[in-house]
Structure formats: structure tokens, C-alpha cells
Amino acid sequence: MNSSGSSYNSELSSLTPASNIRTPGLRFIAIGCLLAVATALVYITGGTSYAYPYVALLPVLLSASWFGLLGAVVCAIAGGVLIGPWMPLNVSEGTFQTTDNWLARIAFFVVIGVFSAALFQRLRKANQRHFKALELDQRTGLYSQAALIRDLELLRGSPDDSSRAILLIRMQDLWEILQSLGADAADQVVKEVASRISKNLAIPHQVYRFSKSELALLFSAKSPEDIDSVFEISQRIGEEETTVNGIALRIQMAAGGYVFDPSDEKGETIINRARTGLSVAMESNASYRLYDPSFDQRTADRVKLIAKVRDGLANQEFELFHQPKICLRTGKHAGSEALLRWFNRDGNWVMPGLFMPKVEATTLINPVTRFVVSQACQRIHSEQLMPVSVNFAVKNLMDPALINNLGKTVSSLGCSPESLEIEVTESALIQDPSQARIAVASLRDQGFKVSLDDFGTGYSSFQYLTQLPLTGLKIDRAFVTDLEHSDDARTIMESMISMAHALKLEVTVEGIETLEQHRIVTRLGADFGQGFFYCKPVPLAEYVSFSYGSQ
């Protein structure tokens, strides 16, 4: 089954987050009750000569949202009739409305219903386009992690309670392919491997691109032996030659699996257990591990890693790299993003994905963030660097001591708040929206710019733009990859940029890798660009050279 086919479960293809309406009957009842209440209210308050008749617009608006144009028109006519010819103009005097009066009201209700239905339809289509962009990997055409989460949640509501399995596969050589041959070659490998796996599986299944270097397989399974068999097929395909740019490549795979009953498991739990199996496999230098409950007890390695991070901070094993930002209007260098890199005591680079998620889940993120802020400020002061942006995690926003004193901390290091920009992800905002709002407001009051990072990757990003005093947003690289080949991708990009500008937000587009992508986002009106096309993250010495050479 390929990415263009139906969803893994036949029931899933007809269900989307926007259309999963399970109780239309209750909505009909609700509309009827609201019409009855509105009619009674108009009568009790003295008739249609008062302002209360327009309370009947509430069920009209709800009908427009729930049932579309036809529902809005029917409800508008029904509401107009209920407070029409049989409803007194003045109850106490016993006078009734003229025919022209109640017909005009019905016409007004219908106009409001039609307009509202059209507006809700446009919003619904915009949401569907947004969901589609999230649920499809534009580089390979495979379903994305968001689609996997959607399908797992929909399976929980399925009457079919047969066992399923998930296999999370890490293509361990993909990073080297990306570094040596580029992103296009790496994407081609992912697409071809996924296609071969799909063609060789005879059981119902779906393939997802879970991350840049990971595939997820969702399929029917009656026993652990079934999932073992699927991995053996996947591993064999990885060992087959895949030719890219005339170079024969073989992919080494590691995987974690989990057999589950979809009616009893949350999607997040299912994924986490497959991820645990993968982690154990990689830690033990094995190619595959099926999840076992005993894995949940393996906290010793995490404790050791956290201890190593603490030692690394003390031993100055951490270093900031800088990735430049370019002003797209002038073509000049305009600042950078500070990215943390760890070179352990053996001089080996520890990839951020191996330690940052664990660090962000503990209180250790606070000293790590303070280290990043301190280093960035010292460099700004000593090297006269242009503005530098740093990333704040969930626990950083929940730390009043850090947030409320950040201005004083920065000033004591010889910098002004205007020289440091704070980037927060949507996950940091939705953890505790009220506290996040307080934290962002405090940062803004102290003079810091605050941007929403990875914009567009979450289902609720839009609401934060109006609720928080943000100064900018960074559009995620997922919306950049297909700009050169897709009108839809360009339309979505243009819409996000226009919306941000309407809210007076600066727009940075990250993940720009080609000249054509640079030209497109420049033409669409983005303010800043960031990506490998301009410069990869580099040590300070290289960044300073880039800085002087680009002014």
C-alpha cells in the first residue's frame, strides 16, 4: 500500500479530524431546543418590538457551522417563522406584526445564514488544506507522523478490536547520506525503501515517514512472530542496493516493535512503546527489539546521561554553533540562531537528538539554558555580534526565576534585551497556556523579542498568534521542501506570511536549501531566511568570518 492509497483501516479513509462527527442527532436536538428557547424568550420579554428576536440568530449560526448552507437556510426560515406571523408585536397590547415585518426578518436571517455558511466553509477548507500539509511528507509523498497519530486515535473508535502492531524503523546510515549526498538523495532513499517494503508485505499495512530518518509501519498482527517477520522483510530490503546519483547504497536498520489492542491503548502510548523498543535495540547494538514492560524500568541509562550532561557543563564540553539569518529584503546578514553542540571528553560529537529530549524533560534544562544565554551574551558583547536567538523549552517558560530576571541577567553580561531573541515552540505554549502567556508577556515587558518556532507543525498554532504578545514566527522547513514544485505549497506559504504580517509579526523561513526556494520565499514577502543554502551551523570563528564577509 503506498502513500496515495487509502488509509490503513478502511474506516479511516472517510474520517478526518474536521469531519469526524459522531452525534448529528444531538446537534439537531440542540438546534431545536435553542429555537424553542429563543421563541419563548421573545414572547416572555414582550414580543418582537424589543431586541430579543435576534437571539434566534444563535441557532442559525450554529446550523451554518454544523450543517452548512442548507442547514443554515432551513434554520433561518424556521426561526423566522417561529417569531413571525403568530408572534405578537407587543404581547401586553395584543398587537401583531405586519406581513412585511416578519418576511423582512426571515430574509435577514437567511442572508446571515448564507453568509455564515460560506464563511465556515472557507475556514473548513483552509483547515483541511492545513491538515493535509501536516499529514503528508511533501518530500516523499508518504504519510507523516501526524497522520500516524490520527490513524491510531481513529483505530481506538473502530469496532474491529483485532490486534495490530507498530514497527518503528531507524535508517542508521541516512545521516551520512544526507551529509555527503544532500537532502534530495536522502529523501530518494527513504521513498524507495518505503516503496519496496510496501510491495513486499502481503498483509494490510500503512507506511509513514515518522521523522527524517525513521519509518513507521502500522499493520495487522496476531502474534510477536508476525512483527518479527515484517522486520526481517524490512531489514532484507535495506540491505539490498539502492542506487542514488550512480552510487549503490545499503541501509542498516534498527527497529522497535509493539503489538497492541487499539481499543485499550492511546496513540501516544503505542508510539512511545515502539520508541522504547527502538532505543533499547540501539543501546544494545541489536537490530530489533520487541517492547517488553521491563524496558520501562530502564532508567539507569537516563540518569547516567543526565550526570554526563552535568559533568559536560562543568568541564566546558558544550559549545554554541551559530546559523546565520539573512534579511531577504536586503540580502544582508541580520543575525543568527545559537545551537548547542556537545563534544564529549573523547572529542566525539554527541548528536542533540540523543540528549536534548531527555534534558528538556528534567530540571537540568534550566542550567543548560542559562549556559546558552550566558555564552550568547558574552559573544554578542565581545564580538559585537548581530542579534542572536536562543531556544526556550517548556520548563524554561515555567521557571519564573529565569523568566522574570532574564533582563537583569542579560544586562549584567553587557548586552541589551534587544540583542537576544527568544524562540519558543508550540509544545512549550500548550503545556500550560496561561503560564506561557504570563512568561511571554514578562519577556516582552523586559524588551526581548519572542518568536514562535516551528510554526505550522501543530494543529493549534494559529490561536497563539492572537493571544500572545509575539513579535515573530518561524515557518517550519516542512512547508519549504516542496515550494519549487507545488502551487499548493506556495499558496500555503503565501497565506501564512500574509497572515503573520497582518498581525505585525516578522516572518523567518527556515530550512531553505536551494536558490529557487530562496527566490520564492523572497518573492512571497518573508522577512528573513535561514538554512543550508546560506550557511550550516558553524563554530564562532567561522561565523564571525561569515558575519564580516556578508555585511
Image (cartoon, rainbow, N blue to C red):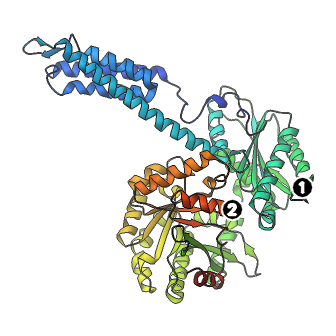
Whether pointer 2 and pointer 1 mark residues with C-beta atoms closer than 8 Å, the reply is no
Question: Do we see residue 59 in this rendering?
Answer: no
Q: Is residue 315 above or below residue 261?
A: below
Q: Which residue does the numbered mark 1 point to in the structure image?
A: 243
Residue 193, image x, y percentages: 83, 49
Please state which of the two labelled residues, at mark 2 or mark 1, is closer to the viewer. 1
| Mark 2 closeness class: few <14, some 14–19, many ≥20 residues within 10 Å | few
Mark 2 lies on residue: 299
**Given the current orientation, which residue lies at the most extreme left position?**
93
The quarter holding residue 93 reads: top left
Could you tell me which quadrant the N terminus lies in? top right
x, y (%) of residue 125? 52, 36
| Residue under the image location 86 percent in, 34 percent down | 202
**Left or right of 120 in this view: 7:** right
Kindly state the secondary structure of the residue where label 1 is placed: strand
Amino acid bearing label 2 = Thr
Q: Is residue 173 left or right of residue 9?
A: right
Q: In this orientation, which residue lies closer to the viewer: 29 or 529?
A: 529
Specify which label sits upstream in the sequence, 2 or 1: 1
Task: Look at the picture and state if 90 lies above or below 445.
Answer: above
Mark 2, secondary structure of its residue: loop
Judge whether residue 293 can be spotted in this image. Answer: yes
Foreground residue among 437 and 196:
196
Residue 101 vs residue 43, the one in the foreground: 101
Q: Residue at x 48, y 71 (%)?
A: 421
Residue at the outermost bottom position: 382
Q: Residues within 10 Å of mark 1 (few under 14, many from 20)?
A: some
